[in-house]
Image: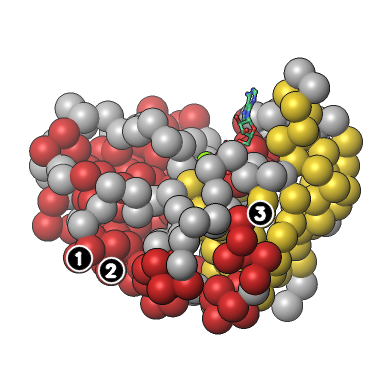
Amino acid sequence: MSALLEVRGLNVVFSGFHAVTDLDFTLQQGELRFLIGPNGAGKTTLIDVVTGLTKPASGSVRFAGQEIVGRSEHAIVRAGVGRTFQTSVVFEELTVLDNLDLAASFRRPLPALLRRRRRISDEVAAALDTTGLGDLADRPAGVLSHGQRQWLEIGMLVAQQPRLLLLDEPVAGMSRAERERTGELLRLVARDHTVLVVEHDMDFLRRFASTVTVLHEGRLLREGTVAEVQADPRVQEVYLGRTRDELSKEVA
Ligand code: ADP
Ligand code: MG
């Protein structure tokens, strides 16, 4: 394995407030990594820096060996970094298929974009298959359930063929069955992508996570297996007020 993402000495300051401090963080090619930490730990800020939305005060972010601090969001997307946002990017009136097709089209040259779609492109077919939304391909996205919509958004990312996917709380608000389905989907996507997932639910982590990174107040607190992270007294302490038993159910 080789490093796909290397964050070194990262500092992010918002008008005097240190949101991320001296952070080193590495993702190996092909990893499915989980990122946890209490509210305000800096998880979303880290994703914002990697995607070029937020400029760090100092530090380096190397993606596939290239420095990306200072590059535009657009350039970083083109380099192969994809993310989901808290707010939906789905077009409700368009079908599931058209949403996927539109997402995939950003990499296509203009003539292909202007040509009417005659057949489903390979990346769209693959995204439909991966997300299990094939039966809903011709339905407007507006009719999808919350879970299905999240899968569509992940599918739209996959259709853009990024090398790294950054998913910020993709299972928030999902039912147990939907979470399970999402976990399976993440495993599938992680077969040929590197994936970073922000999620707190310990049951979910035990089922689907191998390596977990814990942030606390903008600093790296712990990195390890789910079992190692859960057993760490410092991790237990930052989720103050929770007993070990409660912790094993939910760390949020
Ligand atoms: P998390 O995603 O781990 O809950 P965030 O990365 O969103 O945490 O936020 C980390 C800290 O930085 C929080 O205290 C938050 O209020 C602050 N913060 C995040 N974005 C901004 C911003 N644009 N301006 C000022 N403060 C911010
Ligand atoms: Mg967040």
Q: Residues within 10 Å of mark 2 (few under 14, many from 20)?
A: some
The amino acid type of the residue labelled 1 equals Ala
Left or right side of 136 for 197: right
Q: How is the image coloured?
A: secondary structure
- Most foreground residue, 22 or 91: 22
Question: What's the mark number on residue 180?
Answer: 2
Farthest-out residue, top:
15
Residue 156 in view of the camera: yes
Image vertical order of residue 39 relative to residue 158, above or below: above
Q: Residue at x 27, y 29 (%)?
A: 91
Q: What number is the disc on residue 177?
A: 1
- Is residue 25 toward the left or the right of residue 58 in the image? left
Looking at the picture, which amino acid does disc 3 mark?
Answer: Leu
Where, quadrant-wise, is the N terminus in this rendering? bottom right
Residue named by callout 3: 215
Mark 2 lies within 8 Å of ligand 2 (Cβ measured): no
The secondary element bearing badge 1 is classed as helix
At 16% from the left and 34% from the top, the residue drawn is 142
Query: What whole-number distance in Å separates the C-alpha atoms at marks 3 and 2?
Result: 25 Å
In the displayed structure image, the side of residue 71 where residue 33 appears, left or right? left
Q: Residue at x 85, y 47 (%)?
A: 22
200 w.r.t. 32: above or below: above
Q: Are marks 1 and 3 in contact (CB under 8 Å)?
A: no
